[in-house]
């Protein structure tokens, strides 16, 4: 597993609608030893979806799953 890739994305609906205060904050979350991304930069309350490992550039083209498809 390449830890430089984003392994988890937060698909919580209200997190996806918020803009992060700090543009770098969505990447400051680590989950289970891999990088995770929350589009709203929220500190907790996530619904994580395993991506299988994607790049930052691929997030713009990623087909985001619905909240009910997340594991937690």
Image (spheres, rainbow, N blue to C red):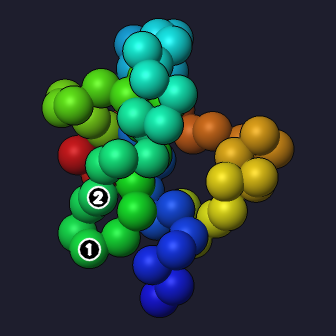
The front one of 19 and 1 is 19
Name of the residue lying farthest toward the left = 44
The residue lying toward the viewer, choosing from 69 and 58, is 58
Instruction: Give SS at disc 2.
Output: strand
Q: Residue at x 40, y 35 (%)?
A: 25
- Disc 2 crowd rating (10 Å Cα; few below 14, some 14-19, many 20+) is some
- Asked whether residue 17 is in view, the answer is yes
User: Quick check: marks 1 and 2 in contact, CB under 8 Å?
Assistant: yes
Where residue 20 appears, as percent x and y from the top left, is 45, 19
- x and y percent of residue 17 in the render? 51, 11
Q: Which mark is residue 33?
A: 1
- Quarter assignment of residue 32: bottom left
Alpha-carbon span between mark 1 and mark 2: 6 Å
| 51 relative to 43 in the view: left or right | right
Is the residue 31 above or below the residue 21 in the image?
Answer: below
Residue 30, disc: 2
Q: Position of residue 6 (x, y in %)?
A: 52, 62
Q: Position of 34 compared to 59: left or right?
A: left
Outermost bottom residue: 1
Report the side of 30 relative to 23 (left or right). left
Tell which residue pokes out farthest to the right in this image: 61
Disc marking residue 50: none
**Residues packed near mark 1 inside 10 Å, few (<14), some (14 to 19) or many (20 plus):** few
Residue 27: x, y in percent?
A: 44, 47
Q: Is residue 55 above or below residue 72?
A: below
Q: Residue at x 18, y 32 (%)?
A: 44
**Residue drawn 56% across the image and 70% down it:** 5
Write down the quadrant of residue 21 in the picture: top left
- Indicate whether 22 appears above or below 66: above
């Amino acid at each position: 597993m390449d830890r430089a890739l984003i392994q988890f994305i937060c698909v919580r609906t209200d997190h996806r609608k918020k803009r992060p205060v700090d543009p770098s904050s969505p990447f400051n979350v680590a989950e289970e030893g891999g990088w995770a991304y929350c589009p709203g930069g929220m500190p907790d309350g996530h619904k994580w979806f395993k991506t299988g490992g994607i790049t930052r550039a691929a997030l713009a083209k990623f087909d985001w799953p619905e909240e009910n498809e997340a594991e937690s």
